[in-house]
Image (spheres, rainbow, N blue to C red):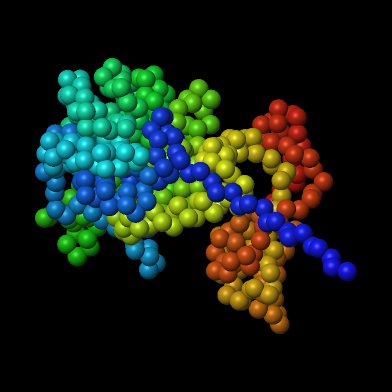
Amino acid sequence: MTVHIEPTLKPKKIVPDLTANTAGIISPNPFWLASAPPANSGNQVKRAFDHGWGGAVWKTLGQPIQNVSSRFGGLHFRGTRAIGFNNIELITDRPLDVNFKEIAEVKKQYPKHAVIVSLMVESEEEWRDIILRSIDAGADGLELNFGCPHGMCERGMGSAVGQEPKACERITSWVMKYSTIPVLVKLTPNIDDIVMMGMAAKRGGANGVSLINTIKSIIGVDLDRMVVEPRVGAQSSNGGYCGAAVKPIALHMVAALAREAEFGLPISGIGGVTNWRDAAEFLALGSSSVQVCTEVMLRGYRIVDDMIEGLTTFMADRGMRSLGDLVGRAVPTYAEWGDLDMNYETVARIDADKCIGCHLCVVACDDGAHQCIHKQAGTHVPRIDESECVGCNLCQIVCPVPDCISMVQVENGYPPATWNEHMAGLGTLRPKKGAH
């Protein structure tokens, strides 16, 4: 007797759609070049699109300037080159006619890719002229550079606008009078309250915002010459800080706007994006596209291949069919400190099979935390006194072995209670550890 066995059909794997829509600016994926040297010319943007970038924000156009030499500086840390990056470069130094000609050529050859033109001028008349020229060249959107923290702000532009709500609102309203394409306002991080500036852009009529621009900074000092870097002869100046090290600041500011109920505008996230994971974090905190500059300057356009592949795999593994399934997913978890559950408790636990006995956790806990990790006679594996462990995570951070130290939730018999509830007499907090 022949038994017929039906073949087992494997479920078809989801191929996520990475198409991005930021304020009506459509691109085949959310990865854009930020307005900077990698988007300085038509040939560069064409090569970037050939590599797979979904969009590009053209290096800021305005009255062309003369740049200085040198103009870049890097922050190197424990053998890693340029974890932070600094520049004192200004806007385009190429004639506007040349820029607009190249923008038109790029858009004609790559009609499905997003070309956004970054602009920075002074008077309303200048704004009108450069906006109309950008539209005529075929731009898909405009980005108003209200964030540059050096050089241009001394001339009443850049962050001088981005730090003053009335100026931001007024100039944005000028632009909206003349633009027939989406307008993003690029915000400066050199401000106490990013929400205030985002709301100013909204009042001015902006279709969306992009953030963050660079952080006002000095990258270092040449101790042999006693000159601030990057050195221009015997002097230098403050510049704009960017690169991997600024990501936490950028994530905070993006999330602060994304969770603001009255804001509600699309966001293009910028700041420290080096790989697909960084991009996914920006998307989860409310960005609908991400812009990359420093990592392209350091590694080249080819990095987008891994970004696209990584994000696609990540979304497919989680059943996400489009970017809309990811954008903003983590925003509801961003709360004020007073609304956190004070009774949630974790302790550190060490996997003895993975421990290499370096005792970095012992030193860190003893000198920088709560003295609850101790050496043990007869074994290389430290002992954790859970009765004193406050779950601060420091040991996990310094441990060089992946997954060797885990933070494990423990039950303590106390129901959830926040600090605000406690102060209002509505909740009881668990006893503090290490209060001896």
- The residue that appears at 61% across and 68% down in the rendered structure is 362
Quadrant occupied by the C terminus: bottom right
Residue 201 visible from this viewpoint: no
Name the quadrant containing residue 298.
bottom left
Q: Is residue 436 above or below residue 98?
A: below
Name of the residue lying farthest toward the front? 1
- The residue that appears at 30% across and 22% down in the rendered structure is 180
In x, y percent, where is residue 338? Answer: 62, 35
Name the quadrant containing residue 387.
bottom right
Name the quadrant containing residue 289.
top left
- Judge by depth and name the residue closer to the eye, 93 or 87: 93
Quadrant occupied by the N terminus: bottom right
Left or right placement of residue 121 versus residue 406 in this view: left
Q: Is residue 62 above or below residue 215?
A: above
Left or right placement of residue 99 versus residue 207 in this view: left
Residue 317 visible from this viewpoint: yes
